[in-house]
Amino acid sequence: MKIDSTLYSYYLEYNAAYKSKSQLIRVISENWFKDNMFCPFCTRERINIYNNNHPVADFFCDFCGEEFQLKSKRQKLGNIVVDGEYNKMIDAIYKNSVPNFLFMSYGLNFDCINDLIIIPKEFILPGIIQKRKPLSHFAKRAGWTGCNIVLKDIPDAGKIYVIKDKNVVDIQEVRAMVERINFYRKIKDIEGRGWIADVMNVITQIKKKVFYLKDVYAYVPYLRNLHPNNNNIEAKIRQQLQILRDNKIIEFLGRGVYKKYECDSRERCPEL
């Protein structure tokens, strides 16, 4: 199975039929996904498109049942992706009914896909949802409050590339990266997932492959702000580091020293 990162043939096919750029990219992306996208969570080689206006997701896997919602941006994804209504999103998170997200950036002239990232639904947590200002009373939907998904607050382990810098990542590598975080995806408690994700994100922010416990402790104020009801942040950090050690996200080298396991498009994941 081979993935084609180019979009231009779809642009030529549908450009004349759609004056709206948002409708055009929706049709282009839907058809590209229908022809190219596999399920990262099982062995299915294609995912399916829901009928228009499905309330939660755009695509689904008819084998494992995973659902996907696509968000597309021109040129670069950036740190923030606009999403829907704030309260509905928060409610869906606590009900564990959020779909997996696919974030796609595409070329200025609809020529190719620059980046395509999978965010497993378990990484969509209240802490990465940014509340926007309500619409003014002059607006048609006065008072409606939207939200943003803050990508920079998602740890690297939760951002799985299918296409990176226009280069297609090997399917087996994508599935290996998903397999690597299966321990995390099995955690149903949102508070528990939140702590692990927050500490993973701290480790992402530490720009060293080998780091020290004191490097993580430097983020105690940040973690205290995220978890104001916890009075023993340092002990909680050590607990999360132990979980990440046990699941081969990091390696313990001794005396408060840790090493990151790298897992990206250039390096195979360690066996779990």
Image: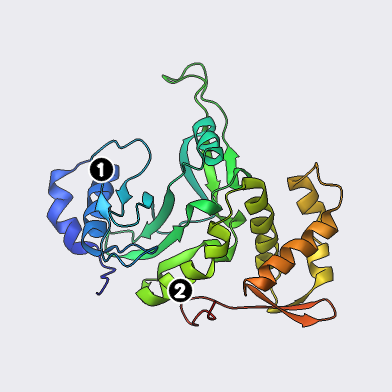
Q: Residues within 10 Å of mark 2 (few under 14, many from 20)?
A: many
The residue that label 1 is drawn on is: 23
Please report the residue visible at 49 percent of the width from the left and 24 percent of the height from the top: 144
Label disc, if present, on residue 14 of the rendered structure = none
Residue 68 percent coordinates (x, y): 37, 51
| Residues under numbered marks 1 and 2 in contact, where contact means CB atoms less than 8 Å apart | no
In space, the residues marked 1 and 2 are separated at their CA atoms by 34 Å
**Which residue corresponds to the image point at 60% horizontal and 47% vertical from the top-left?**
128
Q: Position of residue 264 (x, y in %)?
A: 50, 75
Identified by mark 2, the residue type is: Ala
Q: Does residue 118 appear left or right of residue 234 in this picture?
A: left
**Disc 1 element:** helix
Q: Amino acid at mark 1?
A: Gln
Q: Name the one closer to the observer, 106 or 94.
A: 94
Left or right: residue 3 versus residue 9 is right
Q: Image quadrant for the C terminus?
A: bottom right
Tell me the residue that label 2 is attached to.
Answer: 176
